[in-house]
Image (tube, rainbow, N blue to C red):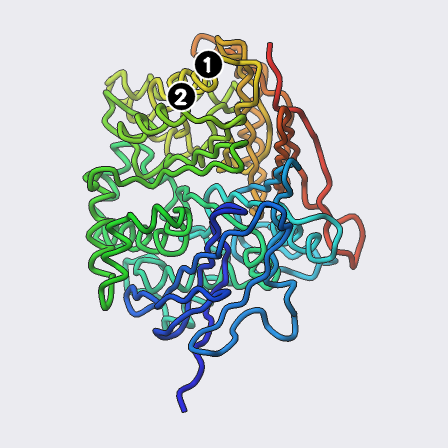
Amino acid sequence: MTAAPKLLLGPIVRGTAPKDLTVWVELDRPCKVDVNGTRVSTFCIAGHHYALVPLRPVTPDVISISYSVIADGSLLWPPPEIGPSAATIALPVVNSAIQIAGGSCRQQAPEPLWFRRKSSSYGDLGPDALATLAHEIESGVRPAPHLILLTGDQVYADEKHESVECRLAIRRGGPPEFGRPDVTSFEEYTWLYQHTWAHPKIRRLLATVPSLMVFDDHDIIDDWNTSQSWAAEMSEKNWWSDRVISGLMAYWVYQHVGNLSSAQRSDDPLFAAISAADDGAEVLETFCDLMTRNDAPKGASWSYSHTLDDRLCIAVVDSRCGRVLDPDSRSVLSPYDWRWLEQLVKTTPAEHLLVVTSVPWLLPDGIQRLERRVSSLINSDRGFISRVGEFLRQAVDLEHWAAFGNSARRLAAVLDTFQADDCQRGSVTVLSGDVHFAYTAELPLPSGRIANQVVASPLRQSEYTFERAARRIAMSRFCRRLLRRHADLAYDVTNGPWFRNNVAHFSYTHGAARARISQARTRRARSHPKLETVFETALTRQR
């Protein structure tokens, strides 16, 4: 008798409720997967087997939907010991608020006992904000959001916790080949994703709350596409091509393909080719190779959008892979993505706009000005000074929107076209992560609307003393005055910074939008951490 298929990872609910939800799973062998009567065959990539099963749309009056995952006739989810609550999705009620949670930078490591502060060579990671959110939802302390936005560094292919390095070594049967990093091949990336999302609370959270995701640098490598100089240096490493292509292949199957709507997947020639192949690894590898060289097929992009209930338009942009690194035309977004975003923002009928970019658009102004100053030194082509500038850029991660020519100004101009005929309506917000602290900023736009920047980072990451000190110096009044000639946009940092593990929350209704940041804190011994609100603000404001 053939053994039942084994669920290696998932289920993970992808997409946006209530009209377009998909259940993603990874299994140990090819099989037929059934979710609530919709049955599909698995597809294969490099010997790994995956399925995406659309959930049937429900009527607007339905407030939740339950599902089960059955493979070749065997029930795989929900586990009998947990029950149907592990496969029940809360749906937004008509005319009620759409609730969203978001964050970035989650280091994969064992969760220590809550009452013990466990240190490692990577510092004290602190309580996991995403696991804390999951615990509070599971225990009934707070209702589940309708969507989770994971805005970068879902996995750390470098700067790994020692427990991850040990796990990789065990699975590999020893250390990596001489001269190669721990994570280079697609197979090693699959181990990384499985390890990161296997945490019981995270697994249950992703099985019950729809999610959208986008990569940042650590999903591939630290400082990914910082500059042309960085790219030239990496191209000389004999393992780099394997790593970036394998990383993007893993990103496509574990994150990106679930970002697409059911209709987009049905029309996607790449997904069709992979699904039709006995093993789609070669097809996917060719595509990812083209994407790394900015030679993608026409219309191919990692950017995407969703509209929820005609109320909120979410535009998620690729701020890493598509960067233009030519010193004379540096840009955070590729020409195709700029055209796509401009058209989307100008034409969306949604009342609110939320743009997701993994790296902050508006930094604390001392850091923003420092990035512009260092970029100008590099572009001055003064030999030694230019080399010092490049060293600083890579050493302290001066590679956000401000470091890419007029990208920050251009995004402000794009945002100003949203609902241009009625600037008193709705809200404009940019959500970012990456920098390992949280804050908010406001930029008055020419139309009279306020553009909000909300940064939520990290979900779980070390607090390096030197990093915090460097950031505080860069944000100081002295640094702002020293670099005052290099200001480009007149905005204010309105709240923060906060340096502990945190998560952002958004609430969207007709005519109003709010945001808040919560930190994961442990107040007493032998207690679970709690999410404590450190600030809350309205997003629907005009000058």
Dot 1 amino acid type: Ala
- Residue at image mark 1: 420
The front one of 441 and 45 is 45
Q: Quadrant of residue 78?
A: bottom right
Tell me which residue sits at (53%, 49%) in the image.
106
Q: In this rendering, does residue 173 appear at all?
A: no
Where does residue 143 sit, x and y in percent of width and height? 70, 48
Q: How many numbered marks, from 0 up?
A: 2
Tell me which residue sits at (30%, 32%) in the image.
323
Taking 426 as reference, is 120 above or below it? below
Dot 2 amino acid type: Lys
Where does residue 533 sit, x and y in percent of width and height? 72, 37
Tell me which residue sits at (61%, 38%) in the image.
98
The front one of 221 and 283 is 283
If the image is split into quadrants, where does the C terminus sit? top right
Where does residue 152 sit, x and y in percent of width and height? 46, 43
Q: Is residue 21 left or right of residue 113?
A: left
Taking 34 as reference, is 307 above or below it? above
The front one of 130 and 461 is 130
How far apart in space, not on screen, are marks 1 and 2 (Cα)? 8 Å
The local secondary structure at tag 1 comes to: loop
- Residue at image mark 2: 346
The local secondary structure at tag 2 comes to: helix
